[in-house]
Image (cartoon, grey):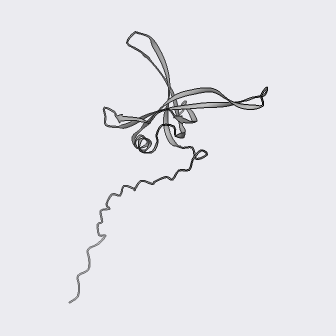
Amino acid sequence: MAGDTYLTLSGNLTAAPKSGTSRTGTPWAKLRVASTSRVFDKTESQWRDGVTVFLDVMCWRRLAENVVASLERGDRVIVVGRLHQRTYEDEQGVRHTVHELEADSVGPDLGRAPARPVRAAAEVTPAVVTPEREPEPALS
């Protein structure tokens, strides 16, 4: 959609994915990804951890089901999706702003560990066969 802010995020899951079903019956999963930048310290000539960014990721439908079945706490993932910002008030009337990534795809970071995808069986609907013409009568 025009105007959406797309983001690619690489990081580690801080907890196992949480899952559920919406009021309309749509499966969902929520992840929290921690991503820490690496900064080169010139004075000590070595790499150091920079600031860690924590971002909530929402997955829907089949992606949500696959995320729950495949990922666990600590897994290194790559997430591609649309960045959203929403604001809400808590019970004390304090206004909060939250940034979330609505995932289009989530996968393991193969630079950190091997993974073997398991392809889901295609849903096959039986074809209805209708003859184009009547069969010819057999000769006796």
Pinpoint residue 25: horizontal percent, then vertical percent. 31, 37
82 lies above or below 94:
below
Task: Write the residue at 45% across / 13% down.
Answer: 95
The quadrant of the picture occupied by the C terminus is bottom left
Pinpoint residue 39: horizontal percent, then vertical percent. 70, 29
Pinpoint residue 38: horizontal percent, then vertical percent. 67, 31
Q: Is residue 31 left or right of residue 137?
A: right
Q: Residue furthest top?
A: 93
Task: Write the residue at 45% across / 54% down.
Answer: 119
Q: Residue furthest bottom?
A: 140
Mark count:
0
Give whichever of 46, 68 is nearer the camera. 46
Give whichever of 2, 12 is nearer the camera. 12
Q: Is residue 72 left or right of residue 11?
A: left
Quarter of the view holding residue 134: bottom left
Q: Residue furthest left?
A: 140
Give whichever of 81, 19 is nearer the camera. 19
Pinpoint residue 86: horizontal percent, then vertical percent. 47, 22
Q: Is residue 38 left or right of residue 140?
A: right
Quarter of the view holding residue 111: top right
52 lies above or below 19:
above
Task: Write the residue at 53% across / 38% down.
Answer: 79
